[in-house]
Image: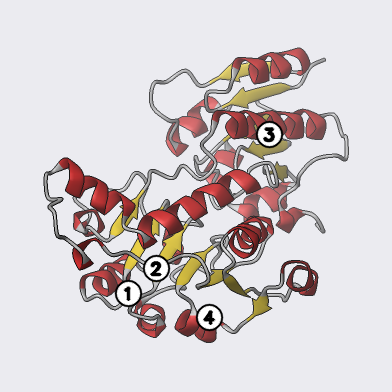
Amino acid sequence: MKPNIYVARPVPSEVAQYLETHCEVRYWTGEESITKDQLVHEIGDAEGLLLSGTPVTAEVIEAAPNLRAISNIAVGYNNLRLDPIIARGILAMHTPYVLDETVADLAFALILAAGRRVTELHEWVREGKWEKGQEEELYGLDIHHTTLGIIGMGRIGEAIARRARFGFEMNVQYYNRNRKPDIEEKLGVTYAGLDELLATSDYVLLMLPLTPETRGMIGAREFGLMKQTAVFVNVARGPIVDESALYDALVQRKIFAAGLDVYAQEPIDPAHPLLTLTNVVTLPHIGSATAATRLEMASLAARNLVHALQGKPDIALIPELRNV
């Protein structure tokens, strides 16, 4: 008998076909993204759950007595409350690796756009502010041969470091919970303490997962350590950063600019003060948003779910479950 699964978000047709070949599938059909409360009502007797972003809390777990596997279509999994999942012995999976290069591309797009003021000067042209004789008003910052500091040297951080070293001949330093001697040797990057990295980097890139330890990690003190010419880029998770402190640092010109793909609240409130600043490049959390990568992520998540329910070992368990 096929296992019963619930798919809580739209998936490409080929992914749906794969799931329906191996499972009895129910789909969320609402026009808006499913909420936690709606998921509690919908999940029923599902043995497997495929989703992205919606919180899976103890209430969701309690509403699903047959649930055996959860597959998250993302590399991050801060929407999953791990204590009730682990207590029930539920398998929880994510989609690492398949999005590394795409997110690295996006991170570098933000470095370039914020450093060279691309979006700000795009608006200058459209608004008729470009005049002959302008010089310093149009100046941005070099990227090549400057120093990039990466906070969080996972696989995506490594992909970004490779672009920086061999594409732009940047000096690259990184801060990470554990040193990575193999990456240091392979890419010619150096390890630095967090304060040293903040004080000496021209570009500071945040690439950490959101955990209780990293929540609010970058605040007024950290922005105060950065160069006035520094550019801060966040493609990790919004709640790692104190957005009020970031706003103050930008308004007071304690740092030069910022490039943001993630926010404490998503979608960000259109009235948020950060959106009033010209020295901020803002994107709607599109780090992995290409058709090819999103298809690969959904396909991996579907395989993870099916294989977990079939008892196969080749699944991408989230790190906290690998030694449980």
Give the residue number, with chain letter if any, for mark 3.
301
Residue where numbered disc 2 is placed:
231
Proximity of marks 2 and 4: CB atoms separated by less than 8 Å: no
Mark 1 highlights which residue?
255
Residue located 58% across and 32% down the image: 294
Q: CA distance from mark 1 to mark 3?
A: 39 Å
- In the picture, which quadrant includes the N terminus? top right
Badges 3 and 2: C-beta atoms under 8 Å apart? Answer: no
Q: Earlier in the sequence, mark 2 or mark 1?
A: 2
- In front of the other: label 1 or label 3? 1
Q: Earlier in the sequence, mark 4 or mark 3?
A: 4
The type of residue carrying mark 2 is: Val
Spatial separation of the CA atoms under disc 4 and disc 1: 15 Å
Q: Quick one: label 4, few (<14), some, or many (20+) residues within 10 Å?
A: many
- Label 4 and label 3: CA atoms lie apart by 36 Å
Residue 279 is labelled as none
Cα gap from disc 2 to disc 1, whole angstroms: 6 Å
Label of residue 197 in the image: 4
The answer to which of 117 and 49 lies nearer the viewer is 117
